[in-house]
Image: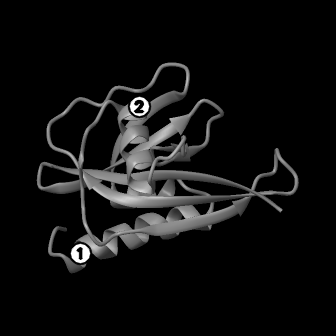
Amino acid sequence: MNWEYSCGAVVYTRRDGELRFVIVQEMGGAYSYPKGHMEGEETEIETARREVFEETGLRPTFIDGFRETDEYDLGEKPGTRKRVTYFLAEFGDEELVPREGEIKKIMLLPYDEALRCFPHAGHRRIIEAAYAFLKKAGKT
């Protein structure tokens, strides 16, 4: 079995008193969180920071204590499994800027709408865990 490793973040902000989550639409049409492949000797958090900036133009504050992983088979690469490590990050009033050629669009959605973007259980589990973490921390 071959493995690919990526890292990213569930990125959120507060607008009009409500949490809003950054959801990116990839060029192929799938919805996800900002993420990408690890490069060189990067740590997971370094990869997540770089990828969030590259895909969204944001430099959010990463929240200590949240780390979730998702694993799945890559249909386009038989015999390859992907592991994605996600962190949680908050931003303020910065402008979202989609990375041309990689990201089709960026959406800033309330939790319920963001949850509905994901047909795959893994993506839903990640945002559910992030929301539960924020709720427990009193940030909802």
Q: Position of residue 83 (x, y in %)?
A: 62, 60
Which residue in the protein does label 2 denote?
Answer: 54
Q: Nearer the viewer, mark 1 or mark 2?
A: 2
At a point 60% along the width and 29% down the height, the residue shown is 27
**Amino acid beneath label 1:** Lys
Label of residue 135 in the image = 1
Q: Residues within 10 Å of mark 1 (few under 14, many from 20)?
A: few
Q: CA distance from mark 1 to mark 2?
A: 28 Å
Q: Position of residue 90 (x, y in %)?
A: 23, 52
Earlier-in-chain disc, 1 versus 2: 2
Q: Position of residue 102 (x, y in %)?
A: 55, 27
At a point 61% along the width and 53% down the height, the residue shown is 5
Please tell me which residue lies in front, 70 or 64.
Answer: 64
**Amino acid beneath label 2:** Glu
Position of the C terminus by quadrant: bottom left
Secondary structure at badge 1 equals helix
Please tell me which residue lies in front, 111 or 85.
Answer: 85
Query: In this rendering, would 11 be left or right of 92?
Result: right
